[in-house]
Amino acid sequence: MKLTRIVLVSVVSTVLVTGYAGAAQNPQQVKMKTCNAEANQKALKGDARKTFMQTCLSSAPAAAPANSQQEKMKSCNEEASAKALKGSDRKSFMKTCLSAK
């Protein structure tokens, strides 16, 4: 009876752990995994690792870099607004601005 319980607990534990590992990770879990990997790569131990992990986990996630087209669109849009362009003048300006290299 005891052996059956042990086997059953082992099977259930394995299923739960396997299911949990396969589940989608939230951003904090991803960050923890990344920080841990970086700490391992740097071979940090003890207090140095603890300090590094605190700093790494508390830092804001890096913002996704905007692509150059988005940056260009924002810049041209701001410039057109500063020049108070409207209607067809704005459309013409935006077309020229966005096509410029």
Image (cartoon, helix red, strand yellow):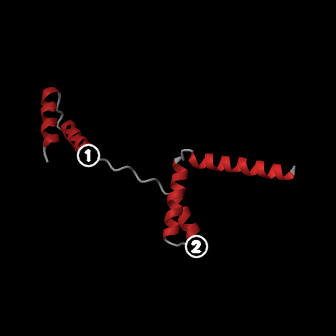
| Residue 27 percent coordinates (x, y) | 51, 48
Q: Are marks 2 and 1 in contact (CB under 8 Å)?
A: no
Q: Secondary structure at mark 1?
A: helix
Depth check, front residue: 65 or 2: 2
| Residue 26 percent coordinates (x, y) | 54, 46
Residue at image mark 2: 45
Q: Residue at x 53, y 57 (%)?
A: 33
Going by the numbered disc 2, the residue's amino acid type is Lys
Q: In the image, which disc is placed on residue 26?
A: none
Whichever of labels 2 and 1 marks the residue nearer the N terminus, that label is 2
- Mark 2 or 1: in front is 2
Residue 93 vertical position relative to residue 56 in the rendered view, above or below: above
Depth check, front residue: 2 or 60: 2
Report crowding for label 2: few under 14, some 14 to 19, many 20 or more residues within 10 A (C-alpha): few
Q: Residue at x 39, y 50 (%)?
A: 63
Q: Residue at x 49, y 57 (%)?
A: 59
Going by the numbered disc 1, the residue's amino acid type is Glu
Question: In which quadrant of the rendered view does residue 74 lie?
Answer: top left
Q: In the image, which disc is placed on residue 71?
A: 1
